[in-house]
Amino acid sequence: MKTATCFLFCLFFLIKSGDCQYTVTKVVGNVLNKKTGVKISSGSRLVEDDILQWREPFTPNDMIRVIAPGRGTLVITPGPKAKKNQSEILDFVKTHLKIKPKDGSLSGRASNDEYIPGSLETEAKINSRVLIFPVNHYLFDKREYDISDGSRFFLQINSAGAKPVIRQLKTIDDTLFIPASDFSLYPDPNGPSVKYQLGFFSKTKSATKSLIEIKPTFDTAGLMKMIIKEMIINVKENNKMKLREACYKEIYIALGKPSDIDFEEGFEGVYSSLLKASTKAPKK
């Protein structure tokens, strides 16, 4: 406990000299930073005096989710006292930072199963999307899915007006690899007419089985690791296990459900890197 406390104190010291910034993890709606004219998105940085420009079309769900220094995750929404005109709502970041989000609880880290297809199941109240990295790793039960006889997993892409596209997926031992490039056939992989289905072909039975539909969202800019870093630095939590769970939940809510294997690798990598950096911090 003492080591963890010293670690987090050193991390705070490393960032203390900088301006108080809020890291955006998720945006619902069309919001610009009026000072810069730049659209706010996951990974954006805000300070308290930034002016938010909420633009049409407005919805009751419009919000910005941020990691606040020393306070964890908060939500900013357009306030009733915001300046209004026909096409926009203006408000300061600092106006609503005290509004805490009401998050649903996760029923399980791997949604009831560490193996596919259960590990790809999502909880709609949290996020229906699956977070996709350049390469994604999932465990499967070799007793249920015997690939020793030439059977295989595949990703099927269905799009209105086009023939289904089948992509065979690579496996090593009990691990399935799903590369992001296998989703890249269409200009808009998140388009409403495009659906992605994970399936299994049994060679002995000469039959295919649909396992689960995947609704992907892509992390091409290292957003997961950025969120992990900001959470470790800014959340007041000395217990590593609880900190890991807080990071996982924020990523799930903000971006989509990650593979447990890839999340663990990302968390341990960032945590270890920050731990090394903290040992080099000047001592008070």
Image: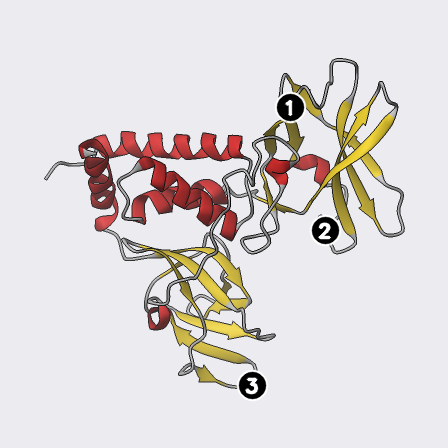
Name the one closer to the observer, 50 or 126.
126
Question: Mark 2 or mark 3, which has the lower sequence index?
Answer: 3
Three-letter code, disc 2: Asp
Q: Distance between the residues labelled 3 and 1?
A: 57 Å
Q: Mark 3 points at which residue?
A: 86
Say if 65 sits above or below 110 in the image: below
Specify the label residue 18 is tagged with: none
Camera-side mark, 3 or 1: 1
Looking at the image, the residue that sits furthest to the top is 148
Residue at the spot x=58%, y=34% of the render? 113
Residue at the spot x=61%, y=74% of the render? 57
Question: Mark 3 or mark 1, which has the lower sequence index?
Answer: 3
Q: Name the residue under label 1.
A: 141
Q: How crowded is mark 3: few (under 14 residues within 10 Å), some or many (20 or more)?
A: few
Q: How far apart are marks 2 and 3 (CA)?
A: 31 Å
Name the one closer to the observer, 46 or 113.
113
Residue 75 in percent (x, y) is at 41, 63
Residue 116 in percent (x, y) is at 64, 32
Residue 275 in percent (x, y) is at 28, 32
Please, what secondary structure does the residue beneath circle 1 have? loop
Residue 242 in percent (x, y) is at 35, 41
Query: In which quadrant of the rendered view does residue 1 lie?
Result: top left
Residue at the spot x=41%, y=41% of the render? 245
Camera-side mark, 2 or 1: 1
Q: Mark 2 points at which residue?
A: 188
Please, what secondary structure does the residue beneath circle 2 have? loop
Please, what secondary structure does the residue beneath circle 3 have? loop
Query: In which quadrant of the rendered view does residue 133 lie?
Result: top right
Say if 209 sits above or below 37 in the image: above
Name the one closer to the observer, 108 or 39.
108
